[in-house]
Image (tube, rainbow, N blue to C red):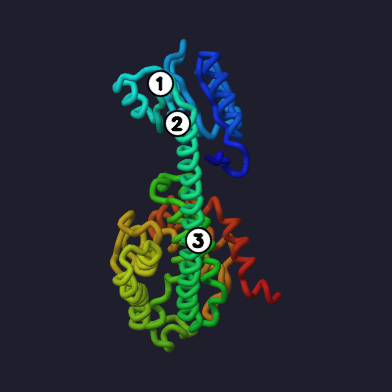
Amino acid sequence: MDTIHINSYPSNIMIVDDTADNLRVLFDMLKSRGYSPRPVPNGKLALQAMKIERPDLILLDITMPELDGFEVCKRIKSDEKLKDIPIIFISALIEPFDKVKAFSLGGVDYITKPFHIDEVFARIETQLKVGRLQRELKATIENLEIRVREQVKEISDSQLATIFSLAKLAESRDDETGKHLERVRNYCKLLAEYLGEHTAYASQISTTFVENIYQASPLHDIGKVGIPDAILLKPDKLTAEEFEVMKGHPALGAQTLKAVVNQYPNNPLINMGIEITRSHHEWWDGSGYPDGLAGKAIPLSARIMSVADVFDAMRSKRVYKPSFSLDETRELIRTGSGTHHDPLVVKAFLTLQEKFNETFEELDEDTEKS
């Protein structure tokens, strides 16, 4: 019968028995078959030794002083680093109760003394084969999971690129918005990360929330594709009637995205995109549009987007207005706390305003051209 070596080295087998003759017999027997045996005279030393060098398999006697084999097995199985080591009990106890207890504690086999050498070898090699196959299966599953994650990420990245391209298409109708989408997604990420770490909103903001708001925020004005050019591109102040038409873009955008979510109802990214698109013009005091939501009835993602959008709109130059300074923009947002904006989001913005401004200047086309 061939000896089983795991990972091309002799299998490390710990022998735990308080009887010197048993240790010597098992040691010589295993050594003669090419294994690497480690004799240990009691359970306490065995527990210490296996933490220093993890054995591939343990031959464990039951009747020992201080810690018997049952207790040693129990402690091994309670240790996350050791619990997967196969344990074969070798004992003079022959009562069914003892065997049942051994298996219930996690033993994989039970050999009764006096033992036959060939039987011991057969059972050892069977368990080493099982252990090898389990490790190979685990490695296969892990490799498969990695491949699946890579493929999902590839699909996800492709979908995100498509979503962002659609948002850019909507934005491209107004050639003065520059890198607005790139900037607001970064503002939203800054705010979400801060709120998730430093405020009462921590329980609502996970790493997934942060990633989703970063990816979904460019969709906020996708509804503008349904606004006539005469209104969308008008260089002068809109009339009351024109403004009413413009106010329809959040609902138009949300309606467009709902057609997608009907096919993929559990997609959190698209669902957040709907929240942001429909509600980023809602105001904290209930005077916004299109639904007149107030306070925390406004989705948190939209409350974050509202501050990010106002900041970028104020700092950006338009044909109908100059660029506002950071001080002017900060004051406008600060005075809107509790009326236009969620006070906690405003407070976060005031802490992060310099980072907002750095992002704006880094991604401002006028700055790049100068």
> Residue at 54% of width from left, 34% of height from top?
56
Q: Which residue is mark 3?
A: 147
> Residue at 59% of width from left, 57% of height from top?
355
> Residue at 62% of width from left, 61% of height from top?
358
Classify 310 as above or below 53: below
Q: CA distance from mark 2 to mark 3?
A: 42 Å
Classify 33 as above or below 195: above
**Residue 19 visible in the snapshot:** yes
- Depth check, front residue: 294 or 358: 358
Q: Quadrant of the C terminus?
A: bottom right
Q: CA distance from mark 3 to mark 1?
A: 42 Å
Q: CA distance from mark 2 to mark 1?
A: 22 Å
Classify 9 as above or below 356: above
Classify 116 as above or below 165: above
Q: Nearer the viewer, mark 2 or mark 3?
A: 2
**Amino acid identity at mark 3:** Arg
Where does residue 23 sit, x and y in percent of width and height? 55, 19
Task: Tell me the quarter of the picture where residue 304 sits.
Answer: bottom left
Secondary structure beneath dot 2 equals: helix
Where does residue 367 sit, x and y in percent of width and height? 66, 72
Secondary structure beneath dot 3 equals: helix
**Residue 332 visible in the snapshot:** no
**Amino acid identity at mark 2:** Glu
Q: Which residue is mark 2?
A: 119
Where does residue 18 sit, x and y in percent of width and height? 51, 14
First in sequence: mark 2 or mark 1?
1
Asked if residue 172 lies left or right of residue 365, the reply is: left
Where does residue 348 sit, x and y in percent of width and height? 49, 51
Asked if residue 307 lies left or right of residue 30, the reply is: left
Q: Which residue is mark 1?
A: 70
**Amino acid identity at mark 1:** Phe
Instruction: Please report contact status of discs 2 and 3: CB closer than 8 Å, yes or no.
Output: no
